[in-house]
Amino acid sequence: MEWTALWVSLRLAFFTTLILTVVGIPMAWWVATSRRRWIFIVEAVIALPIVLPPTVLGFYMLMLTGPYSPVGSVWINATGVPIPFTFHGILAASVVFNLPFAVRPFIAGLSSVDRRLVEASWSLGVSRTATFCKIVVPMAWPGIITGMVLAFAHTLGEFGVVLMVGGNIPGVTQTLSILIYDEVQAMNYADAARISMIMLVFSFTMLCMIFSVQRRIMPV
Amino acid sequence: MSAVLHVDFEKRFPDININADFEHISDGFRTTALFGPSGCGKTTILRCIAGLERPEKGRISWNGEAWSDPDRKIHLAPQKRRIGFLFQDYALFPHLSVRRNIGYGLPSGSSTQESIEDIMGRFKLTGMENRAPRELSGGEQQRVALARAVIRRPRLLLLDEPLSALDMTTRQMVRSELRSMLMDAGKPVLLVTHDPVKVLTLAERVLVINEGDIIQQGTTTEVFSRPVNKTVAGIVGTETVHHGEIISIRDGLADIRVGDTVVNAFAEEADGKLVDICIRAEDVSLFRGNPGRTSAQNVLDGRITELISEGPMYRVSIDCGFPLTALISKQAKEDLALTPGESVCAVIKATVVHVIPKG
């Protein structure tokens, strides 16, 4: 039982991190370098999930993606499956919910890149995109790694928003944290304790590994 | 064929408006310095030419090719201007080796490798290929930055405060090296500096910039010996600037009342005209007692008020009816046994007293 749930948790964390890395880095670069006055509104929207209760976000996600909503009906017509109570559904919710945990460290990392290095690269005839890949990303690497670790770890521990959007379907949407809740509800304290311990050891080991790697690769 | 950089633009900031209007014409190596106090807008002019800032009005062009023309919505990207920009702190990529810094952005291939080897030899960098920029001395970092800019065969080199990231002793060593490397590159150069010594050692022409405006331009000798007004005189570091009044003029040689004394200088102004006189400290000779017969028109008796040691030189302040500064060697100071309070005789040729009409 718990191995199935662990697999769901790991898949969810992996894909959430992947999507947030691909989407979040350009978004963070845009926020970090924009001179527009209203950019603080974008920052506030990105940070919103930090302060919003997961149930509130889950409720809105449910409303937005339900089969009778515009987004939900387009999706169901295109794919034949609904968004809520599926793996795609919790993945979408998880991406939105983890946005600040990935994007804010990305912004911090990208902002720390010396603007002059970017300008030096442009002056040397290298395009904006190539400059971003060759100079900005390698220089912002500690911030990018931090964002990815936080997004991954935070997704593993996610509970409220997944429960709201995904329910509790073993093998599909039942993650480890939801399984623990289930076991406690059923008074299976021994199982809950074992799974909790698995999660604690797993999360701690992973964080230790990544932080030690980050220390070694940190440039300059 | 000579290359012409034509610059005539306006760039506005909340606290300063920058107006740049000049031409840089060259057949190969030729250096113009943009010179002025910090915050005067000289770096912004350089950044506009590089395409890193956008002027609001006017035009920047290179041999007739428009680089910037906001009225026609033209802004050529920095990548397409083919310029070499040397940043103040060099902006070497810290995560790349010396070789990869120099070859940055060049197509990989044997010809690129060859030109990297070649330029590293010319810039005395052989053996440092795999070092990181932080393992280099300041002078070496500058050579890498210049090699990186020059290897792409830029049409124009822009230098922002070169040498200022170095300490005093290294700076003196690297200064002559920089000039020979620039001559070697054979490109037109615009350099920004606030240091008059760099202007005199590195540039042929100078634009004096103050509060966003070019207030004088010309050859370095012309600008440094004949500032058009008191502000330029202050910026180029003319030590003695004092107001005076022309009493009479005979054959172009004027008697000018300055403080409590009369100074002779060449002037074209009518009688009664108010002027400023400028005298560079190195043009003043000092004597103890009477200098005897001399061709110099100004022999002024005075008293030493202050002596300041500046390396191998002494800066001597004298009260000779008006405050005058002289620059003499340490040896001369000892030979004449100069101390504050002593009386001394200052000798100045009429030809080195520069007269600026007031108003």
Image: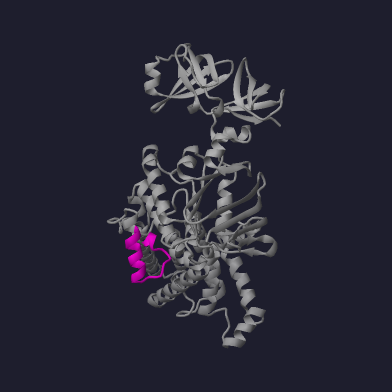
Q: Residue at x 55, y 30 (%)?
A: B238
Q: Position of residue B188 (x, y in %)?
A: 49, 54
In this rendering, the answer to whether B31 lies above or below B349 is: below
Q: Is residue B145 visible?
A: no
Q: Which of the two residues, B1 or B96, is positioned nearer the viewer here? A: B1
Q: Position of residue A52 (x, y in %)?
A: 59, 61
Q: Quadrant of residue B278?
A: top right
Q: Residue at x 33, y 50 (%)?
A: B136
Tell me which segment is drawn in magenta: B100-119
Q: Is residue B108 magenta?
A: yes
Q: Which of the two residues, B159 or B222, is positioned nearer the viewer here? A: B222
Drawn side of residue B192 relative to residue B172, left or right: right
Q: Which of the two residues, A8 or B262, is positioned nearer the viewer here? A: B262
Residue farthest front in this picture: B251
Q: Is residue B57 magenta?
A: no
Drawn side of residue B94 relative to residue A53, left or right: left
Q: Is residue B128 visible?
A: yes
Q: Main secondary structure of the magenta part?
A: helix
The quadrant in which the C terminus of chain B is found is top right
Q: Residue at x 66, y 27 (%)?
A: B275
Q: Residue at x 63, y 83 (%)?
A: A74
Q: How is the image coloured?
A: one colour
In this rendering, the answer to whether A128 lies above or below B126 is: below
Q: Position of residue A75 (x, y in %)?
A: 60, 83
In this rendering, the answer to whether B196 lies above or below A81 is: above
Q: Position of residue B228 (x, y in %)?
A: 63, 36
